[in-house]
Image (cartoon, grey):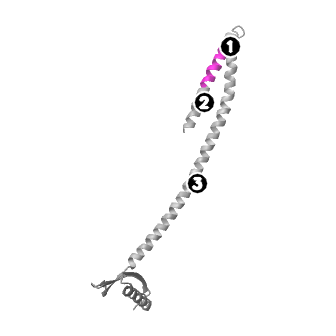
């Protein structure tokens, strides 16, 4: 009832001849299809039993249907392949996300650098002129003007402190 029985017989006969010649264990696998076309896999071992003179007394042959085992190996290999592809895909996604995050970080760094310059430069000029006005002799400025200069300096220092805090927080983030 086996379609490939002649092929199987030749392979097993050759294994028996090898065992008889070499006096060693022979392992093998044969695949066959039955009359309905189903494929089966058989593992076999052929072992010589030696007597005291190291001559073969008998040969023990063992056959085992390994079809389910082979099918399980096939499905396991398929699952492994699918998982490897999923890992490759996810790794690619993560590398893309990392690249985007790096670009965002670089843009933030560039922004902070520019904003630091854009805010601090004019503010430092205002504070510098305010300090010059404070250093002027007291007679040149009226009390009202001295009050204005004081407010300019107080507001400028507060604004500079706020800018520094915002930029420091952004750099930590």
Mark positioned earlier in the residue sequence (2 or 1): 1
Q: Which residue is mark 1?
A: 135
Q: Is residue 38 visible?
A: no
Report which quarter residue 165 is drawn in.
top right
Q: Which residue is mark 3?
A: 96
Nearest to the observer: residue 46 or residue 8: 46
Q: Which residue is mark 2?
A: 163
Residue at 53 percent of width and 57 percent of height? 91
Labels 2 & 1 near each other (Cβ < 8 A): no
- x, y percentage for residue 141? 70, 11
Q: Which labelled disc corresponds to residue 72?
A: none
> Crowding near pointer 2: few (<14 within 10 Å), some, many (20+)?
some
Mark positioned earlier in the residue sequence (1 or 3): 3
Locate the N terminus and report the quarter of the image it occupies: bottom left
- x, y percentage for residue 58? 30, 88
**Left or right of residue 16, residue 148 in this image:** right
Q: Looking at this view, name the residue that lies furthest to the right.
A: 140
Report which quarter residue 89 is drawn in.
bottom right
Specify the segment rendered in magenta. 144-158
């Amino acid at each position: 009832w086996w379609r490939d029985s002649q092929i199987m017989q030749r392979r097993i006969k050759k294994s028996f001849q090898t065992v008889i010649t070499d006096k060693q264990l022979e392992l093998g696998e044969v695949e066959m299809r039955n009359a309905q076309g189903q494929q089966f896999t058989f593992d076999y071992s052929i072992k010589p039993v030696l007597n005291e003179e190291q001559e073969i007394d008998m040969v023990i042959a063992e056959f085992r249907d390994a079809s389910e085992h082979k099918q399980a190996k096939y499905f396991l290999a398929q699952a492994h392949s699918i998982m490897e592809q999923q890992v490759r895909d996810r790794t690619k996604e993560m590398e893309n996300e990392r690249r985007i995050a790096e670009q965002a970080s670089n843009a933030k760094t560039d922004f902070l650098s520019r904003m630091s310059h854009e805010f601090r430069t004019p503010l430092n000029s205002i504070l510098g002129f305010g300090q010059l006005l404070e250093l002027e002799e007291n007679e040149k400025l009226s009390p009202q003007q001295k009050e204005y200069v004081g407010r300019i300096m107080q507001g400028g220092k507060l604004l500079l402190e706020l800018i520094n805090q915002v930029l420091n927080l952004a750099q930590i983030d």
